[in-house]
Amino acid sequence: MKVSEYLAMKPEELTAKINELKTELFNLRFQLATGQLENTMQIQAVKRDIARALTAQTQASKKADKAG
């Protein structure tokens, strides 16, 4: 996903998406450890998505703090 898509999400949706991505990362790491993961680049892509989502969450919270 792009950063703009994360910024368009509501805070609850963003938190749910972050949790979903963390679960996916756990599953990918588990597959890597058991030798079932064919594309190891998936791990890097999910990590980047988590970072994008966390950045969007931080920006939204700072924006809300300034407004309120």
Image: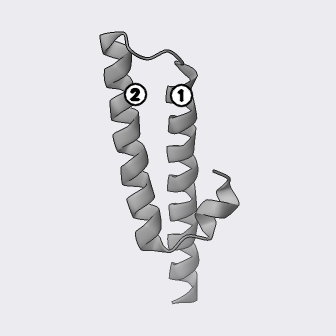
Residue 8, position in %: x, y? 62, 71
Contact (Cβ within 8 Å) of mark 1 with mark 2: yes
**Whole-number angstrom distance, CA of label 1 to CA of label 2:** 8 Å
Three-letter code for the amino acid on which mark 1 is drawn: Gln
- Which residue sits at x=33%, y=33%? 26
| Count of numbered circles on the image | 2
- Which residue sits at x=34%, y=31%? 27
Q: Nearer the viewer, residue 51 or 23?
A: 23
Instruction: State which tag comes first along the sequence, 1 or 2.
Output: 2
Residue 65, position in %: x, y? 51, 80
Three-letter code for the amino acid on which mark 2 is drawn: Leu
Residue 46, position in %: x, y? 51, 37
Q: Secondary structure at mark 2?
A: helix
- Which residue sits at x=39%, y=61%? 16
Residue 40, position in %: x, y? 52, 18
Q: Nearer the viewer, residue 25 or 67?
A: 25
User: Does residue 6 sit above or below 19 in this rendering?
Assistant: below
Kindly identify which numbered label has been placed on residue 42. 1
Residue hosting label 2: 28
